[in-house]
Amino acid sequence: MAEKANPPTLKRLRSYDDVFYRGGYELGTTTHGFIFNDEWLMVALDHPSGEVPPANVSLLNSHLLAAFSGGSESSREYLLNLLPNKCRELQLKKGREASAAEASKWLAEFLSLHLDTSCSFSLCILIAGWEESGPSLYKVKGNGRRLEVRGSSAGTGCAAGCSSIIKNMLSDDNKDITVDKAKEWAKKTLCMSVYHAHECGECVSVYYVGRPGVELVVSNENIMKLQKRYLREVGRKWEDLRKYNKARALGMGLELRKASAS
């Protein structure tokens, strides 16, 4: 019956094309999702202080979650209630838990049917899941566009988040990465990508999605305190590099003088 109800109209903030291809931007709290080692995922998001669990996250089943960015409050609440109900219907019908592919496909079709597809909306949902074939991650936009991704970002920190995610996921340093290291990296990436964001919550939380299921591994850590810590770390690295380059230049100068004297 919930499907037949008229969904609330999303507020049209502006028309934009996909942030990856047209240099656009998105609105709403920021969410990052990324697959590691082809075995598990991390989903990081910012939200208001004191929300446990965050209000913009919906646990669809033991191995599947959806994280929402942007959109009006009424539209988020509607979908946060509707999507879990649909996943339960799929489970009863098929005798197994719904997959990320099934949930994201249904959501994309629902949005494209019920919303005006001539205009994009600020709403964006990341759906992360794990099944026997491995982890999967989908990005569903407010106009019904659906993308299967290995790493992606949604919300006001999307542009900075995507570039950081892509850079780090292609790095050899992240092969065979541990869960603890990925958890710290997810937290850091989220905090730094919203540094200049005007729609940022006070706290960051991180979810792990893998064979054991969905687990909240970082809860309500203060973003401002983390940003100060990470910026100090960056500052120390630059200062160490400056000192190293200065010492190296002095050493090369001494070697040149010795060579000319001989």
Image: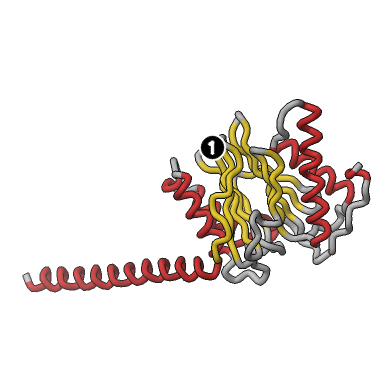
* x then y, percent, for residue 136: 63, 39
Number of numbered callouts drawn:
1
Kind of residue indicated by mark 1: Asp
**Residue at x 42%, y 70% (from the top left corner):** 232
Colour mapping used in the image: secondary structure
Relative to residue 228, is residue 135 depicted above or below?
Answer: above
Q: Which residue in the rendered view is the most extreme toward the left?
A: 262
Closest to the observer: 78 or 193? 78
On the rendered image, what quadrant is the C terminus found in? bottom left
Picture coordinates of residue 260 (x, y %)? 11, 72
Q: Quadrant of residue 93?
A: top right
User: Of all residues shown, which one is farthest toward the top?
Assistant: 95
Residue 216 position, x and y percent, is 58, 49
Residue found 79% across the figure and 33% down from its top: 90
Q: Residue at x 67, y 64 (%)?
A: 156
Tell me where residue 104 sits by quadrant.
Answer: top right
Q: What is the secondary structure assignment of the residue under circle 1?
A: loop
**Viewed as shown, does residue 121 lie left or right of 23?**
right
Residue behind mark 1: 38
Q: Quadrant of the N terminus?
A: top right
Where 105 falls versus 92 (above or below)? below
> How far across and how far down the image is residue 27, in percent?
72, 64
Residue under the image location 84 percent in, 63 percent down: 11
Q: Quadrant of residue 68?
A: bottom right
Q: Is residue 14 left or right of residue 249?
A: right
User: Between 203 and 102, which is closer to the camera in this rendering?
Assistant: 203
Q: Give the class, few, some or many, for how many residues have Cα within 10 Å of label 1's Cα (few <14, many ≥20).
A: few
For residue 139, side relative to residue 73 (left or right): left
Q: Is residue 209 above or below residue 194?
A: above
